[in-house]
Amino acid sequence: REHHICLSVHPRFESRLRGDKNSNLEKLARAYPGIVFSIQTNEGLLPGEVAIQKSAPPCLRTRSDI
């Protein structure tokens, strides 16, 4: 059974969290098999702040989620 982790980040820092061509998400997937990571933006967070949330279904998809 897969587990889902949602990473929320301020929109200005989304690309930094993703890395080149989503390389950081790929690294997380390799390091933690069986866990699905997704990223959503949240303007309520401070720039540079990341909120991590375990979610039953994956977090709400945004245009930039993979």
Image: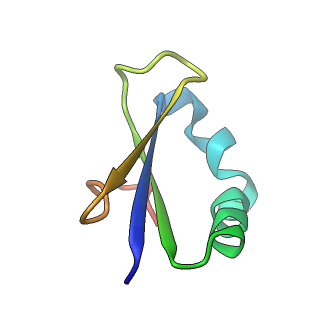
- Left or right of residue 7, residue 12 in this image: right
Q: Position of residue 27 (x, y in %)?
A: 73, 65
Q: Position of residue 53 (x, y in %)?
A: 38, 45
Name the quadrant containing residue 49: top right
Residue 8 seen from this side: yes
Report the residue that reaches farthest toward the bottom.
1
Name the quadrant containing residue 24: bottom right
Q: Nearer the viewer, residue 29 or 1?
A: 1
The quadrant the N terminus occupies is: bottom left
Q: Nearer the viewer, residue 40 or 52?
A: 52
| Above or below for 60 versus 27 | above
Report the residue that reaches farthest toward the front.
1
Name the quadrant containing residue 56: bottom left
Residue 62 seen from this side: no
Residue drawn at (34%, 19%), measured in percent from left and top? 44
Q: Position of residue 64 (x, y in %)?
A: 44, 55
Residue drawn at (49%, 15%), measured in percent from left and top? 46
| Above or below for 4 versus 8 | below
Residue drawn at (26%, 54%), measured in percent from left and top? 60
- Left or right of residue 60, residue 51 in this image: right
